[in-house]
Image (cartoon, grey):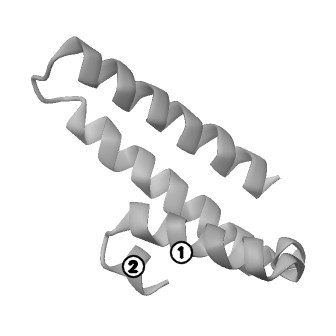
Amino acid sequence: AVYRQLGRYAEAIRRLEESLERFTDLREDPRFLANLADARRQASDDIRRQLESAMPQSERNTLRDIRAEHLTRALDLYE
């Protein structure tokens, strides 16, 4: 939660997913899942802002793919 509050969403996602792997009962914790989903959503917002800048097309494509994955996985977690 600290990483998410600091705007370090990639690190927050990594830590939350590590916790999910170690403590499988967290899959049943709605607050935990909401925190992970929100971190993914916020990470996708950061990427959206990055995509507004000029960059090579290959980087743009990679960021779009990562953003789509974040949004898809966030939606799955919210359901």
Q: Secondary structure at mark 2?
A: helix
Q: Is residue 53 left or right of residue 65?
A: left
Q: Which mark is residue 3?
A: 2
Residue 8 locus on image (x, y percent): 33, 69
Question: Which residue is found at the position 41% from the left and 26% from the top?
Answer: 64
- Dot 1 alpha-carbon crowd within 10 angstroms: few under 14, some 14 to 19, many 20 or more: some
Q: Is residue 22 above or below residue 42?
A: below
Residue 75 locus on image (x, y percent): 70, 46
Residue 19 locus on image (x, y percent): 67, 79
Question: Which residue is found at the position 54% from the left and 75% from the top?
Answer: 15
Residue 6 locus on image (x, y percent): 30, 78
Q: Is residue 6 above or below residue 38?
A: below
- Dot 2 alpha-carbon crowd within 10 angstroms: few under 14, some 14 to 19, many 20 or more: some
Residue 56 figure quarter:
top left
Q: Residue furthest left?
A: 54
Residue 30 figure quarter:
bottom right
* Residues at discs 2 and 1 in contact (Cβ within 8 Å): yes
Q: Is residue 20 left or right of residue 1?
A: right
Residue at the spot of label 1 = 15
